[in-house]
Image (cartoon, rainbow, N blue to C red):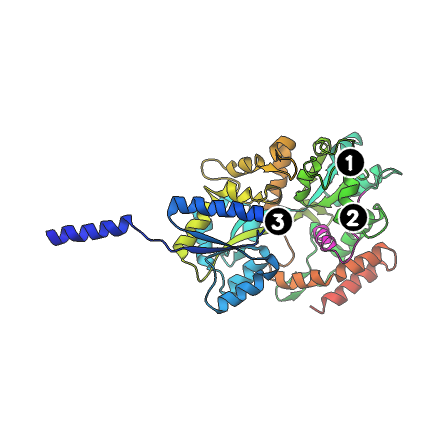
Amino acid sequence: MKNIIKLFCVIGFFITNVVYADIKFWTTEVQPARMAKQEEMAKAFEAKTGIKVEVIPIEEKDLGTRATAAAAAGDLPDVIYHTLQYVLPWAEAGILDVDANNDVVKDLGKKTFAPGALKMAKSGSKIAAVPVDGWTQMVVYRKDLFEAAGLEPPTSYANIEAAVKALSSNDMFGFVAATKTDENFMSQVLEHVLLANGVNIVKKGGIKKQGKKLKNALEFYKVIAKASPPGELYWKQSRELYFAGKTPMIIWSPFIMDELAGLRDSAPPTINSDPTSPELASKTGFITNFSGPNNSKGAAWADIRYFGITADADTDEAKQFVMYSMDEGYTSTLSIAPEGKFPVRRGNASDPEAFTKAWSKLPVGVDRKAALSDLYSPDVINNIVAGLDKANRWGVKEGELSRASKVINAQFINRITRLYVDDQIGIDQAVDMINDQLAKF
């Protein structure tokens, strides 16, 4: 009897004095203010669970080589916060523990996530990494000018072309398109425009020859480029001209949302004499998903970030950390940079919109702070978040994101599009030239 009592005492000691392993977390959110927030989250998680998290900053440009080297040495961190481009390659290379990540998504509830974010991380029947946050490129437009002219919102090529025709004047450029061919901004805008018309440059195992869809998309791009100012245009000019009231439409990321409301002194709206005025924000609408004539469903170009539990992880502890960061601590996760971290997990079992609501109330801005819900209507908030439902990028569903990225980075689509826009070549020649270059990949 005494031995049994002793045995229960020993068991009780271990139950009440469980020693968890510390875990290592790599993050590409390396800016000091963002690191401080992640350290706070790690401490809150440790206080709740007893599991200590070492937050390790890794520059995004170094992440691929660092992960490959760590995998070879059997020394991967437990969890990595990473970009979309690594999800499927790391799953195939055995860097990610696909089963662990899929378990977390199932436990949190697949239906609570944006479908597009899950689809882009699908490896066979499983979700290879846990979607954390994302943003979609947007058509940013002057709602007041559209309404005054009786125009439909810019949800399609046709609607945008109609608005360009109606709103172009001596004082107003109908659009400000990206035309600086060596800027990534042009690559992103072009991919968004081409995706909208169903253009895809890759298929599984190779390249897809282009035809009518690309032709129609380039013809549309020429319309918006011809409505733009002359010169080499990228994000800087498009933002400045929109802020000055010199154009009714641009394509931009959601990082413009706080600037539109006069919360950043380095990029003030100049539509009136008060650079801190929220007037322009109140007159602005956002379209994340728009369509071309060959793709009625349209598309939204998106940048999604993920948590990846790795093959070398202390799996149970890593799962707890990711679950915490995506549930009880999810609002804190999004607060690291709310204007660029749309919630890919909208809510939970008790409230399907819990996290969207909480995110909309997070303060944004640099020199002044305000909640997005104080600046924009619920319809605007819901619309921009819903863009993640149809999030897309070339090569994701085919498992060819790496090949697509190489094509994009070569920038020949930018250069050939610019030749066509500048009337140096015709449309058929432009499509042929792009196909000739694609064949090299």
User: What type is the residue that disc 1 sits on?
Assistant: Thr
Which quadrant is home to the C terminus? bottom right
Element marked by disc 1: loop
User: What type is the residue that disc 3 sits on?
Assistant: Ala
Q: Nearer the viewer, mark 1 or mark 3?
A: 1
Q: Which residue is mark 1?
A: 270
Percent across and percent down for residue 418 are 82, 56
Percent across and percent down for residue 434 are 76, 63
- Disc on res. 177: 2
Q: Would residue 184 be counted in the magenta stretch?
A: yes
Q: In the rendered structure, which segment of residues is drawn in magenta?
A: 175-194
- Disc on res. 391: 3
Residue 316 lies left or right of residue 403; in this view the side is: left
Quarter of the figure with residue 61: bottom right
Residue 253 lies left or right of residue 217; in this view the side is: left
Mark-to-mark CA distance, 2 and 3: 22 Å
Q: Residues within 10 Å of mark 1 (few under 14, many from 20)?
A: some
